[in-house]
Image: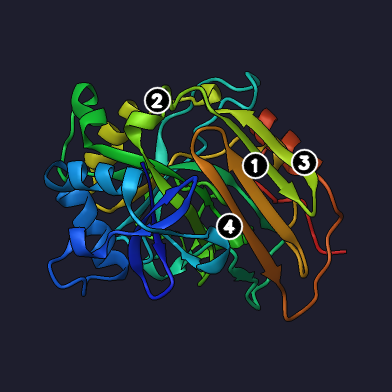
Amino acid sequence: MKLVLFNDGRPGLLTDRGVIDVSQVVGQTGARVGQEAMEAVITRWDDIRADLSSLEEEGDAVPLSSVTLLAPLPRPGKILAMGGNFLEFGARERSPMWGFLKAQDAVLGPGGTVVLPDVDANIFHHEAELVLVFGRGGKDIKEADAMDHVFGYTCGIDVSARIVTGVPGGQRPPDYLPIAPHKSYPTFAPLGSYIVTKDEVQDPHNLQVRLRVDGELRGNYNTDDLGHSIPESIEWVSSMESISPGDVFFMGTNHQGLGAMQDGDTIELEIDGVGSLSINVADPLKRRWAKGVDELTAQDVREGAGGPGRRVRPL
């Protein structure tokens, strides 16, 4: 199933016929909206799945064009993220695991606008990522049990301000950064457009990820390039952070398709079997960088020469 939040935060199902309001199934009064509503769907899934299936087949649907989709999880308890988790098309060996948290209030919904802040950044990068949604909580989860904690998947963009001096050792922390400031500005965590339940994704380690800016293809990679699998990553991150239903986990990106985000851009992300997400970009300072793929960063990451974006400056 494809689960959405729409209009005033109502929970719904996205179907070929349109969007079906499932508020009455989720809560007796239909009063649950937003994050609370989606967490109720997740935590009550076993109890309400049959009712949702019936609505998916027979419920009243309204055209998708007549509703406004919101981020399916507008304020997760935690936004976890892996760093350096891809092999860059085989150019790199598996590196030690590291990661970070993004701030809860960084979430942006589909069709929203990323606003670039007034900070001294070398560049602002779009990082196209598969994002998993947790359905069960826990701590110190074992790799063998990790997938039992996954509820579903969505699309995400890890927006990154490349401020080389902002993190000791450049952009890469030595192990784990509880909150990554350069990735946590408001609107720096676009999510959506919906959650697809994990039963509809045959193999999350074999999904093509494509990101376009104003129609130009930049990111284009498969999740089979992951250095550390989803179960490995869950075991690692849960050794440091407790996990709750409705938390999200960015799995990292292949850096060979990064490029500048700048004023007026329209960015579209598509992940096969998971969905699509479109956002806009605004920069009050109207800074400009070269269009296209940031080849300097791609080379740096392939060669392990330094943090992403360390040599790129505005035009």
Q: Quadrant of the C terminus?
A: bottom right
Amino acid bearing label 4:
Val
Q: Secondary structure at mark 2?
A: loop
Q: x and y percent of residue 273 in the render? A: 50, 33
Q: Which residue is mark 3?
A: 217
Q: Which residue is mark 2?
A: 229
Q: Quadrant of residue 39?
A: bottom left
* Dot 2 crowding, Cα within 10 Å, few <14, some 14–19, many 20+: some
Residue 122 visible to the viewer: yes
The residue at the point 25 percent across, 47 percent down is 52
- Please report whichever mark, 1 or 4, sits nearer to the chain's N-terminal start: 4
- Please report whichever mark, 2 or 1, sits nearer to the chain's N-terminal start: 2
Numbered label attached to residue 306: 1
- Please report whichever mark, 2 or 4, sits nearer to the chain's N-terminal start: 4
Q: Secondary structure at mark 3?
A: strand
Numbered label attached to residue 159: 4
Judge depth for marks 2 and 1 and give the one in front: 2
Residue 111 horizontal side relative to residue 82, left or right: right
